[in-house]
Image (cartoon, rainbow, N blue to C red):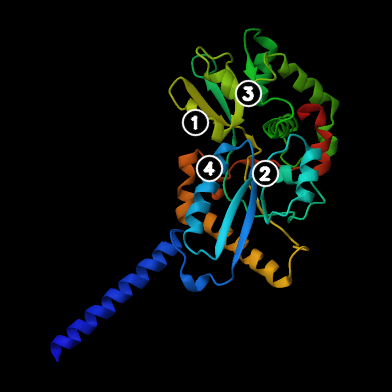
Amino acid sequence: MNQNKIIFGMIIGVALLVITGLFILELVGAFVLPTRTSNEATIEILVPNDDTAIYEWVQSAAQTFNQQDEKQQVTITRLRVSDTGQLEKQLNSTQADVWLAEADFWRTMSNSDPFAEQGDAIAYSPLVWVAVQSIVTGEVDWQTMHDLALNDFQFQAALPPIGQIDRLAACLSATASYHDQADLTSTLASDRGLQTWFDEFLQAVPNPRQNPADQLSSRPPKVDVGLLPYHDAKPFTESTFQQIPARYQVGFNYPYLIREAWSHLSPTESANRQEVAQSFHDFLLSDGQQNRLATYNLQPASAVSGQTVTADGRTVQALKWCWQ
């Protein structure tokens, strides 16, 4: 009799350990309990075409997510756009369920698409100055780089090429630094003094069409300092370089924008898509997936710090002289 009680107790103990283990795995994003996934749907997520880091992270996460429940699947599509007009056209014609935009400020460039105007950030990549340690010393930011451009004719810098989203981020950061104000307006963005100040800085930019990472990675580096997103700065961690986050931060925070209406689907199908989209959102923000961001030289969504620049669509448009 006692032996049966012992065996029964052992069975209960093992069962409790298994259940506890499953809950822990679910908590860190490595497993989803079958009872949590009931509705069947396959969703499509748009990710930035030129951002290899975020694409590879999301693609890897989708593969893990898809193994958990064959009824709920995620496919990843790269959004290939070269300008804001093309962005608007593609977003309005797509049947995708989620748009993973590069940043909030890029979302403001498209006002009539089917996706939510705001979404939770799922990762973070701040703008950083990468400077050659032996040449640039002391404070590194827009004003000090501007002063070097005016006073040292040998000083050379690199900015993201015109037309790229990285350049738009750089222009927003420069505007905030010039006005010493994080909350930007179209009036501040179109200020003549700002344009003159920025043109003076450009005197130190010898190759405006070449990516800063390419110029810094040559041996010896072609420039003394470059401004680029953190996810592109991984090659410059050696002692030869120093990395300094921009004081006014215009980071890539990758808002997760779920479609607001599925007019081509039935209410039941729409609800299923919404459920899977939300499930994958939660999965990306789980501890397990957030901890994997470092592998791709990205930071957790919670890593945003410093003075974050804000700008609406009109302000971004007013800066066309700088980024387009």
Give the secondary structure at mark 1: helix
Q: State whether residue 323 appears in this view.
A: yes
Amino acid type of the residue tagged 4 in the rendering: Glu
Work out how far the residue at label 2 is from the one at label 4, CA to CA, in angstroms: 17 Å
Which labelled disc corresponds to residue 122? none
**Rendered location of residue 147, percent (x, y):** 67, 17
The span from disc 2 to disc 3 (Cα, nearest Å) is 20 Å
Sequence order check: which comes first, mark 2 or mark 3?
2
Residue at horizontal 41 percent and vertical 68 percent from the top: 23
Please determine whether, in this image, residue 76 is positioned above or below residue 222: below
Which residue type carries mark 3? Asn
Quickly name the residue at label 3.
Answer: 211
In this figure, which residue is indicated by the disc labeled 2? 103
Q: Residue at x 23, y 84 (%)?
A: 8
Secondary structure, mark 3, is: loop
Category of crowding for the residue at label 1, using alpha-carbon neighbours closer than 10 angstroms: few (below 14), some (14–19), many (at least 20)? few
List the residue tagged with mark 4: 56
Select label 2 or label 4 by which is in front.
Answer: 4
Query: Is the residue 289 above or below the residue 269 in the image?
Result: above
Q: Depth check: give the residue in front, 103 or 33.
A: 33
